[in-house]
Image (cartoon, helix red, strand yellow):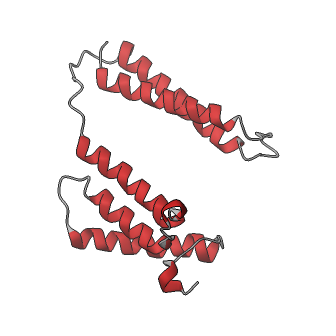
Amino acid sequence: MKNAKDFYAGLLFTLVGSAFGWGALDYQVGSSARMGPGYFPLLLGVMLALLGAVMMLRAALLQPDRLDAIGPWAWKPLVAIIAANLLFGVALGGLPGLKLPALGLMLGIYLLTFVACVAGERFKFKEAALLATALAALSYLAFVLLLKLQLPVWPVFLAGN
């Protein structure tokens, strides 16, 4: 193998794309003229799998020999990014089994941003706060005002519901 990093990245893309494509088949796909809910995920899954296959072929056959060894796992970013997404999901939906109410979109975005910023090499509170504020404002504009999605924006104890 000529480039191990690109090969394994392509393999990961192929596996994830195939999984999404396969999962999309559970929904009605439809046609290009009348797209069903599974059309777009299937299309993206197939495109990702094809991109991964091209990356694997290129890494195995076409690239000059580069001994880019696969390094150790980056545990801190991996745990921080997964935890950030889980916290965001809990903030939006709460945990009814544990009687934890939904914390809302705004608090969820702040939690997501601050925890995800820990994944980087350096953490600056001011940068994370500015990023979280911008993301919260744009998310409110896009999802609540423009798309009119019905989701909890504020924590239940602040919204008075």
2 or 126: which is nearer to us? 126
136 displayed left or right of 93: left
Examine the image and state in which quarter residue 135 appears: bottom left
11 or 66: which is nearer to us? 11
108 or 70: which is nearer to us? 108
112 or 135: which is nearer to us? 112
* Residue at the front extreme, as displayed: 98
* Residue at the left extreme, as displayed: 122
Eyeballing the image, is 139 above or below 83? below
Which residue is drawn at the image coordinates 54% and 27% (left, top)?
50
Percent position of residue 67, x then y: 20, 19
Q: Quadrant of the C terminus?
A: bottom right
Which residue is drawn at the image coordinates 34% and 26% (left, top)?
6
Eyeballing the image, is 151 above or below 157? above
Eyeballing the image, is 29 above or below 92? above
* Residue at the bottom extreme, as displayed: 160
Number of numbered discs = 0
Eyeballing the image, is 131 above or below 63? below
Percent position of residue 9, x then y: 38, 29
Which residue is drawn at the image coordinates 47% and 27% (left, top)?
52
125 displayed left or right of 26: left
Which residue is drawn at the image coordinates 30% and 20% (left, top)?
4
Q: Quadrant of the N terminus?
A: top left
Percent position of residue 101, x then y: 50, 71
